[in-house]
Image: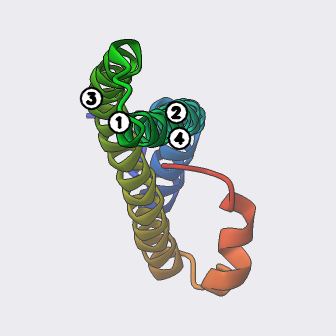
Amino acid sequence: MSNKKHNPVKALKAAFKEEIEDTELEDNYYLSKSRVERYREEYNHLATDINANLKAIENLKEVVLKSAMCGILSPSAVEQIEELESDNETLIKEIEKVENELEYNKKLIKRYEFNSNHKLFVWWKALKAVVPETKPYLEWKVNYENKII
């Protein structure tokens, strides 16, 4: 048998320190944040392309209509409309995928933040139970404001 006595306060503080120093969740959190930025930029780029195509389609349709009213048929304009509409279908499918990924990562970020705040509160309650002098929660948690655990 060991002569050392188990010190629950010391063990709890050590476990909390280990949790705070573990950066795996925090790394994942910041990875999701960077993905959100990347997906947001990609979404904006795709939206710009789609809107440009829609404007070009609108203009071409107007030209085709005016030409048809004058008795002139413009097969090349009709072809361009079909090409732009086909391009837009592809872009719309792509933007939907990007939007899904964007929303997924936004939800993931909120989940990391919620879980981290919850775990931090649970740790504070445990520490407060064994060390009554622990600061009130709002003062104590300031030390861990930008930390994801």
Q: Which residue is mark 4?
A: 55
Q: Position of residue 24 (x, y in %)?
A: 46, 30
As drawn, is 127 to the left or to the right of 114? Answer: right
Measured in 3D between alpha carbons, the distance from the residue under mark 1 to the one under mark 4, in whole angstroms, is: 20 Å
Please determine whether, in this image, residue 76 is positioned above or below residue 10.
above
Residue 133 visible at all: no
Closer to viewer: mark 1 or mark 4: 1
Q: Which mark is residue 56?
A: 2
Secondary structure found at label 1: helix
Q: Residues within 10 Å of mark 4 (few under 14, many from 20)?
A: few
Say which of 95 and 39 sits in front: 95
- Which of pointers 3 and 2 lies earlier in the amino acid sequence? 2
Residue 24 visible at all: yes
Say which of 102 and 30 sits in front: 102
Measured in 3D between alpha carbons, the distance from the residue under mark 4 to the one under mark 2, in whole angstroms, is: 4 Å
Q: Residues within 10 Å of mark 1 (few under 14, many from 20)?
A: few
Q: Which residue is mark 3?
A: 89
- Which of pointers 3 and 1 lies earlier in the amino acid sequence? 1
Secondary structure found at label 2: helix
Measured in 3D between alpha carbons, the distance from the residue under mark 3 to the one under mark 2, in whole angstroms, is: 15 Å
Say which of 25 and 77 sits in front: 77
